[in-house]
Amino acid sequence: MKPFIYLPLWFFKTRVLGKKIPLQSVVFISNKCNLKCQHCTIYAKKDAIVKTLAEIQSDLEYCYQQGSRFVDLEGGEPTLWRDGEHDLNSIIRLAKGIGFYSVTVTTNAARSFAGLEADSIWVSMDGVGATHDAIRGEGTFERLVRHIEGCGRPRVSVNMVVNALNHPSVGETIRFAKDHRNIDSIAINLHTPFPGTEALELDEATRHQVLDKVIAYKKKGYPIMNSVAGLELMRKRDFKKYCWMANFVMVDGKRLPECQGKETGLCERCGFCMAGEMASVMGMKLETLLAGLKLRITG
């Protein structure tokens, strides 16, 4: 029952009183990874950072004190995380003990995530078959499907980041998510051109084509997490940002009140579609509010 009390109160404080209280936190626990993806520069770092459980506890307590009650654990690849006898489930239990209502883990599914105690799991899937492999490495799609089917959960969600390499496969990927018995929904994001990955950015015409296609699938009833209102804002890009709704704790311990894209001057080229969803929430778009409730209460 706590989320049902918290969410309306949070909305009143932020929408009516104008307070900037994060709804969710994104905590990076390590930059250690087991893939070398085209869109990522983390794997090129010589020395991986793996936070200790004590450091992560400090991060989580900070986020909770800021008002956040939902936390996403990310990497690198979070399932690789270890601190002595502690594994990723130790962090999940710690977060729940602190008081977070739900814990989400984002994984590349290159290894099994069976037995993970997260409330929701998002699998990064950048296409179907050879398209996914071209971005994440040969054989990664086959492992992804195998681990989704063998994870012991009836349903997981997938996230596709659309870029200059995989944009022709957006429709195929959405249809695959709909047809696979173990996939509940798919979220669509666009590549944000962080330094070193600029070549993967969509040009403006292609960006519009992709978003129009996703909106068309959404209107046909495909299980796309994004709302039409949020997607339409991402097409225009001239909307007021409310990115403080999510705070970030980076792998080096740096604590940011909103997305790291602001520090690098990428807000106007942002592809993180949650920005559109946040603005739609503040615009009181019913479809977006219902999608947010589904995400945060049912996982």
Image (cartoon, rainbow, N blue to C red):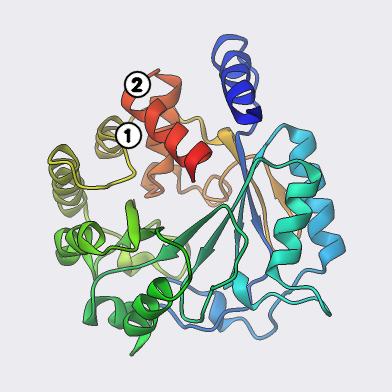
Q: In this view, does 149 lie above or below 15?
A: below
Q: For numbered disc 2, what is the local secondary structure?
A: loop
Residue ID for mark 1: 230
Residue 149 position in % (x across, y down)? 38, 73
Q: Which residue lies furthest to the right in this view?
A: 54
The residue lying toward the viewer, choosing from 76 and 292, is: 292
Q: Which amino acid does label 2 sit on?
A: Lys
Residue ID for mark 2: 285
Residue 29 in which image quadrant = bottom right
Q: Residue furthest top?
A: 16
* Mark 2 touches mark 1? (CB < 8 Å): yes
Compare marks 2 and 1 and give the one earlier in the sequence.
1
Using residue 142 as the reference point, say whether residue 97 is left or right of it: right
Question: Could one spot residue 38 in this view of the protein?
Answer: no
Residue 76 position in % (x across, y down)? 58, 71
Using residue 245 as the reference point, say whether residue 238 is left or right of it: left
Question: Could one spot residue 299 in this view of the protein?
Answer: yes
Q: Residue placed at 15% from the left, 64% from the top?
A: 172
